[in-house]
Amino acid sequence: MILFNTIFQFRLISFIEGLSYLILLFIAMPMKYVYGIPEATKIIGMTHGILFIAFVFILLKFQAEYKWGTIWNLLAFISSLIPFGTFFIDKKIKSFR
């Protein structure tokens, strides 16, 4: 099915992973350190970790399928470590349609 091609999967997981990172940084971390609720970082942190691993696997699949260069692959990986980074790499991903 065309909706579930690698580009769609990569864009979807990039968005969700980036969103989970922002929730972890700007909601769960303040809940832990300001309000003393450590469960927030445990739950959101675990979710983000799983999404990050999925992001890396989809990134490798995308590179293999579309012959994306190692430099772009490295930039996409680094962008996932920077808040809002995955949203900026989305423009490059759109060009593969």
Image (cartoon, grey):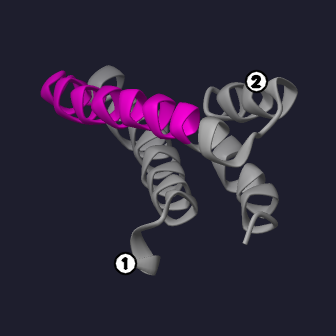
Q: Quadrant of residue 11?
A: bottom right
* Amino acid type of the residue tagged 2 in the rendering: Leu
Screen quadrant of the C terminus: bottom right
In the displayed structure, 51 sits above or below 16; it is: above
The mark found on residue 1 in the picture is 1
Q: CA distance from mark 1 to mark 2?
A: 29 Å
Counting from the top left corner in percent of width and height, residue 17 is at: 45, 44
CA neighbours of label 2 inside 10 A, class few (<14), some (14 to 19), many (20+): few
Give residue 63's position: percent from left, percent from top. Answer: 66, 37
* Res 52 quadrant in image: top left
Counting residues from the N terminus, which is met first, the one under dot 1 or under dot 2?
A: 1
Which residue, given by chain and number where applicable, does mark 2 sit on?
Answer: 74
Q: Is residue 12 above or below residue 66?
A: below
Residue pictured at 62% horizontal, 36% vertical: 64
Q: Main secondary structure of the magenta part?
A: helix
Q: Amino acid at mark 1?
A: Met
Residue 90 image-quadrant placement: bottom right
Identify the magenta region. 35-61
- Report the front residue among 40 and 12: 12
- Quadrant assignment for the N terminus: bottom left
